[in-house]
Image: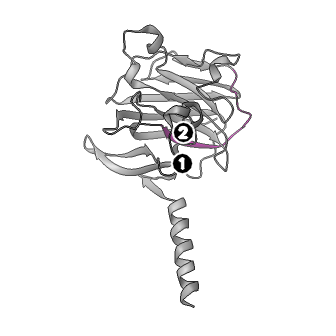
Amino acid sequence: MKAINLLVILCLTLLTACNQETKLKDQSFEFVNVKGSVVELDGEEVLKVERDLEVLPFDEKHLGATVNGPLYTRLKNSDFENGTIEVKVLSRIQKNTPYRDSWGFIGLAFRINSDNSAFESMYIRPKVGRVKNPVVRNQAIQYYSYPNYKMDNIGRSPGGPFEASADIGLDEWITLRIEVEGQQASLYINDKKEPSLSIKQLKGNLKSGAVGLWVDIGTEGYFKDLRITKK
């Protein structure tokens, strides 16, 4: 009987660890390969998210294989097909970042399928938003489609560009707005009238799915004011 009780406790512990979640205002989130918590920043409650390296390790020697994965806090009960996703983000580099070239990777994932094995994503790299080198500056925004079109190979695919520049920086609140219609998606930054990046043909074949607040290696990410408007 004691062995059975211990087994039940172990199973419940593992179940809790695999389904950790938090709530910000009236929205509930579950963590997928990230750690998260509600914290106070600039006098208001926001959601802090960082990649969980114990759950999903990172290997700098195999960069393409270990970045641009399912790394987000997923909005529970969200099913998004077409419409608008808007959120405010603030990105910092972790003090002890495991990746020296971390650029503060932060953004959104959308149309996430039920087992997190496929989704679309548009994210920013605030550290290079204002650098002098125009080639590097043009990598301030990135689109990718998981699992087949990540940042290491999407540039060789037709239909680009999949990167763009943006006047953004670390440690500042940035408004991201993604408008999705069918297989087209456009990212607007800081309420600008024109999109900073438009994708004419999304690479994934998912019609709808969940929304996630996404970060990657070396990022200390903060999110607030997530709003979803469906068409």
Tell me: residue 220, above or below residue 176.
Answer: below
- Secondary-structure class at tag 2: strand
**Foreground: 212 or 81?**
212
User: Is mark 1 in CB contact (under 8 Å) with mark 2?
Assistant: yes
Residue 122 in the figure: left or right of residue 129: right
* First to last magenta residue range: 201-216
Residue 219 x, y percent position in the rendering: 40, 36
Question: Does the magenta-highlighted stretch encompass residue 75?
Answer: no
Give how far apart the Cα atoms at labels 1 and 2 are: 11 Å
The residue identified by callout 1 is: 75
The residue identified by callout 2 is: 228
Residue type of the residue flagged with mark 1: Leu
Residue 93 x, y percent position in the rendering: 35, 34
Residue that protrudes farthest toward the bottom in the picture: 1
Residue that protrudes farthest toward the front in the picture: 61
Disc nearer the start of the sequence (1/2): 1
Residue that protrudes farthest toward the left in the picture: 43
Prevalent SS, magenta region: loop
Residue 210 visible in rendering: yes
Q: Quarter-wise, where is residue 68 in the image?
A: top right
Residue 73 x, y percent position in the rendering: 50, 47
Foreground: disc 1 or disc 2: 1
Residue type of the residue flagged with mark 2: Ile
The residue lying at 50 percent from left, 62 percent from top is 17
**Foreground: 224 or 151?**
151
For the C terminus, the quadrant is: top right
Neighbour tally class for label 1: few under 14, some 14-19, many 20 plus, Cα within 10 Å: many
Residue 195 visible in rendering: no
Q: Quarter-wise, where is residue 119 in the image?
A: top right
